[in-house]
Image (cartoon, coloured by chain):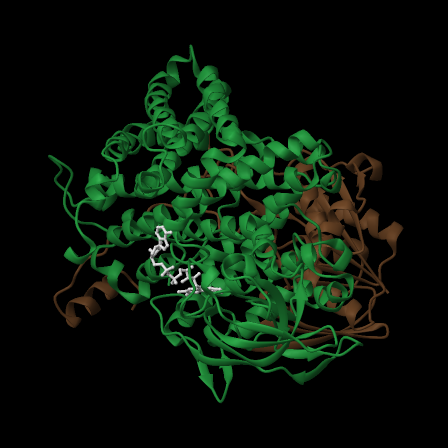
């Protein structure tokens, strides 16, 4: 099985040269002691753990899968030991609150570690990711006694977290959910209902599993305004923090699924389980949604991480596999000499490195949003994050999946054979397009809500960044072609955006039908913007440009000439409106 | 008992080294550098001695160019207590290193010095032995097991055809082999603490030691490329060829 090498150098390049992260951290009081040097050390060590401990159990975990016997879930061989190493290393605490034992590092470092976890072993990485989501939700909304009872153990990693939203009849539309919560009179609640698809609903890595469950109070209004959030642990917790009786939180079965076989996806039954209210009654969705941006960024990064993993194997393979000859050649060549194979690898790489750049950009905005002393800066950051979250979630997982398919294709028949690991990446990447809000729902969020948020202010701010980079490129002959291609696509994007915001297509049906294409359009232009920024950085270095800088310039050239023009087609597709989509009667399908 | 662990920064074991175009050495620009794996084992062994209550303080020492200071932090992250860095941009040879260490040992008075058996960049495998010679201390090289009891150390070493066990009176020099232990991963809290910890930085002159190289490197070159193999038709032919090559 191929190795995984954490792409620390590229991460550090982005932090240091593209986003000048030292300057950003210096302005954020809690992170005043954080710098790129510390980030590099942390990333290198996390990378070592991912390469040496998590990657070796990725394929074996996929083959073995999870088991449910007599109500007990067992993860594949080696997961327990790996989790122990992960917890002993203090990794679950990385970006969490120091008040409860967290290390308080910026989200920017966390999200880069998340990329490595996803790339080396997504099934494993999800356990830590879900716990973090639960911790952040509890931190933001729970009363003090619940925080001090649950957070230290969760942050330490001895207890894990699970998010229980979905029910058989309630997926994208959570307003339909039925699980009920009745007051017991002692401040706690009785929770009854069944949830499906619950990631990490149970496992054998941690002593306790803390479920955050969406349910309805007896007097709740119907729909999404009548949903409350509850905490319901697998084992009840005594006043002194020790574990008490087993709560009635039970695994009904494990889902049999396409990928992430090393991760337990559970049908959960809450059979009169005891639970505690988190946040205000009937405000459960809002409480969940405070964590949504972070969770969606994390899911997006799963697509990126798996794409990177697939690329590593594909590029190494292409440099060794000999088939065919170059035109006029006498000897068999390695397949990397073939233009079509190169195109696959470049398509992969130009997505991966632009996506990583957008990850760092957005995560830095999240760190600003949380800690910048200036309210104006925080507000701008909030808008940018709201805008970019659905783009990252959907585009990274769509392109990430496509990247893993290309990485599979580069290996020919071996791409389809298990031991090479490429087909596992394809299967594992597929789920990220579905959970945490399907990519279809992300596109709806972008077009229906985010484009018109604050009268379009965030989209205006973001577009101003692109204009600014284009202005910087003016008069730079070395990047003139790259800038011109971006300018063309950007102008089209602005025109389409206007139509969706307030023009011809500003109605629910056209917006719904355009959303998916628009999100892809938006993402491609965003990647083009980041490639221009990287290209300009290379040019600014002049003679001092090193081999990585030159590679970046070549990738910018490739992306803007061979991938970005897809935006013209997307613009035209959107232009056709929703009419062709609605022409057939539903019965005709 | 104080344990002193001299450590060296080398080209990372996973990097494919490339020779500089002018043949003066290995190109280290933009290449990942790490703590020498045998030195890491030495640090780990010292930490285990401390955990067992056999050592009270772990002092790490490194001699090298300014950027090699990083490895003192790596050792801090693993659990070293104090670090001393001797900065020089000059190429240092084992004898110069041993002399600097001798001076440091005179000041620090450790009960035990654990070094890697060799550094994976130049594979000299000399520093520990030279240091023992300069100090007149007992030495046990290539240790695969180390036990300390009072003022005695018992060292198992891997030799051709088996294991040899030596008893040494402390203070002594021990050099580590690959199987001595499996170094731990640093924990995140320790990595962060390590960043803030002070490093005592000195120059070779501070010890009055001349580190000018005594050897001149004439040329560094890549090993010759492997010649392609040949296919033989039969076992007889193989035996004949092997005999002709003088290996049978
Ligand atoms: C492996 C796995 C792990 C999961 N983990 C968890 C978990 O930990 N916790 C949890 O609560 N849930 C979890 N889920 C559930 C997941 O979040 C849902 O499956 C997802 O949100 C989609 O819901 P659904 O399956 O009901 O699909 P539906 O909502 O039925 O959607 C079907 C299709 O219709 C589209 N669609 C729906 N509404 C609209 C609309 N308004 N406009 C346009 N298109 C629309 C969707 O995009 C989709 O393509 C998990 C699922 C899987 C498979």
* Residue pictured at 19% horizontal, 41% vertical: A580
The reply, left or right, for residue A334 in relation to residue A241 is left
Provide residue A576's location: percent of width, then percent of height: 22, 34
The residue lying toward the viewer, choosing from A521 and B115, is: A521
Please indicate, yes or no, whether residue A522 appears anywhere in the rendered image: yes
Q: Is residue A338 left or right of residue A20?
A: left
Quarter-wise, where is residue A154 in the image?
A: bottom right
Residue at (56% x, 50% y) in the render:
A294
Q: Which chain is green?
A: A
Label the brown chain with its letter. Answer: B
> Residue sitting at 55 percent across and 30 percent down?
A17
Q: How many marks?
A: 0
Question: x, y percentage for residue B247?
Answer: 31, 65
Name the quarter showing ligand 1: bottom left
Q: Position of residue B225 (x, y in %)?
A: 33, 46
Res B119 visible: no
């Amino acid at each position: 099985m191929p190795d995984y090498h954490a792409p620390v150098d590229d991460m550090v390049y982005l932090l240091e040269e593209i986003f000048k992260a030292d300057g950003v951290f210096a302005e954020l009081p809690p992170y005043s002691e954080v710098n790129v040097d510390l980030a590099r050390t942390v990333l290198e060590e996390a990378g070592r753990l991912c390469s040496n401990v998590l990657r070796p159990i990725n394929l074996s975990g996929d083959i073995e899968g999870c088991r449910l016997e007599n109500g007990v879930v067992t993860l594949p061989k080696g997961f327990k030991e790996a989790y122990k190493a992960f917890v002993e290393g203090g990794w679950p605490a990385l970006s969490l609150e120091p008040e409860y034992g967290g290390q308080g590092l910026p989200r920017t470092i966390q999200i880069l570690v998340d990329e490595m976890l996803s790339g080396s072993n997504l099934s494993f990485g999800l356990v830590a990711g879900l716990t973090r989501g639960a911790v952040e939700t509890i931190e933001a909304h729970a009363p003090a006694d619940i925080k001090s009872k649950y957070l230290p153990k969760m942050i330490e990693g001895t207890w894990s977290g699970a998010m229980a939203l979905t029910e058989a009849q309630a997926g994208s539309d959570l307003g339909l959910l039925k699980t009920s919560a009745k007051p017991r009179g002692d401040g706690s609640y009785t929770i009854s209902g069944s949830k499906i698809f619950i990631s990490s609903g149970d496992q054998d890595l941690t002593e306790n599993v803390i479920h955050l469950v969406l349910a309805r109070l007896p007097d709740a209004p119907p729909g999404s305004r009548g949903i409350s959030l509850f905490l319901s642990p697998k084992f009840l917790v005594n006043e002194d923090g020790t574990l008490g009786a087993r709560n009635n939180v039970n695994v009904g079965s494990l889902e049999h699924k396409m990928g992430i076989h090393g991760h337990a996806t559970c049908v959960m039954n809450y059979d009169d389980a005891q639970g505690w209210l988190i946040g205000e009654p009937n405000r459960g969705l809002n409480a969940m949604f405070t964590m949504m941006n972070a969770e969606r960024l994390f899911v997006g990064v799963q697509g990126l991480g798996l794409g990177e993993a697939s690329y590593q194997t594909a590029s190494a393979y292409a440099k060794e596999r000999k088939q065919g000859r170059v035109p006029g050649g006498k000897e068999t060549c390695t397949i990397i000499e073939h233009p079509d194979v190169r195109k696959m690898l470049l398509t992969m790489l130009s997505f991966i490195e632009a996506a990583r750049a957008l990850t760092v950009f957005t995560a830095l905005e999240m760190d600003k949003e949380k800690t910048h002393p200036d309210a104006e800066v925080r507000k701008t950051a909030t808008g940018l994050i709201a805008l970019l979250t659905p783009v990252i979630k959907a585009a990274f997982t769509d392109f990430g999946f496509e990247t893993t398919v290309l990485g599979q294709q580069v290996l020919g028949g071996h791409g389809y054979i298990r031991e090479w690991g490429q087909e596992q990446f394809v299967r594992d990447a597929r789920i990220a397009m579905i959970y945490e809000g399907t990519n279809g729902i992300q596109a709806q969020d972008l077009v229906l809500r985010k484009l018109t948020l604050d009268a379009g202010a965030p989209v205006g701010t973001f577009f101003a960044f692109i204009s600014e980079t284009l202005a910087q490129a003016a008069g730079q002959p070395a990047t003139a072609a790259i800038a011109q291609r971006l300018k063309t696509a950007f102008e089209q994007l602005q025109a389409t955006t206007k139509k969706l915001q307030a023009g011809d297509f500003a109605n629910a049906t056209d917006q719904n039908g355009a959303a998916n294409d628009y999100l892809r359009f938006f993402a491609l232009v965003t990647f083009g913007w980041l490639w221009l920024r990287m290209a300009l950085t290379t040019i600014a270095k002049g003679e001092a440009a090193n081999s990585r800088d030159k590679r970046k310039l070549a990738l910018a050239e490739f992306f803007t000439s061979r991938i970005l023009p897809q935006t013209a087609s997307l613009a035209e597709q959107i232009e056709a409106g929703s009419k062709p989509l609605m022409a057939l009667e539903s019965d005709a399908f | 008992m104080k344990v002193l662990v001299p450590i060296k920064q080398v080209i990372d074991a996973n990097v494919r080294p490339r020779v500089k175009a002018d043949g003066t050495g290995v190109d280290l620009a933009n290449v990942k550098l790490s703590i020498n794996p045998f030195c890491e084992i030495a640090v780990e062994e010292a930490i285990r001695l401390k955990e067992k209550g056999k050592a009270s303080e772990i002092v790490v020492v490194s001699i090298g160019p300014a950027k090699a200071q990083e490895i003192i932090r790596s050792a801090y992250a693993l659990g070293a207590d104090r670090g001393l860095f001797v900065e020089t941009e000059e190429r240092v040879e084992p004898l110069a290193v041993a002399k600097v260490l001798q001076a440091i040992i005179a000041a620090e008075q450790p009960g035990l010095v654990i070094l890697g058996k060799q550094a994976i960049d130049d594979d000299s495998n000399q520093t520990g032995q030279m240091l023992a010679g300069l100090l007149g201390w007992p030495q046990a090289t290539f240790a695969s097991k180390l036990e300390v009891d009072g003022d005695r150390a018992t060292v198992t070493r891997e030799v051709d055809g088996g294991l040899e066990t030596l008893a040494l009176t402390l203070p002594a020099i021990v050099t580590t082999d690959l199987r001595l232990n499996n170094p731990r991963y640093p924990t995140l809290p320790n990595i962060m603490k390590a960043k803030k910890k002070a490093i005592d930085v000195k120059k070779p002159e501070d010890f009055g030691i001349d580190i000018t190289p005594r050897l001149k490197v004439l040329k560094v070159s890549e090993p010759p490329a492997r010649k392609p193999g040949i296919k033989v038709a039969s076992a007889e032919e193989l035996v004949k060829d092997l005999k002709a090559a003088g290996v049978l």
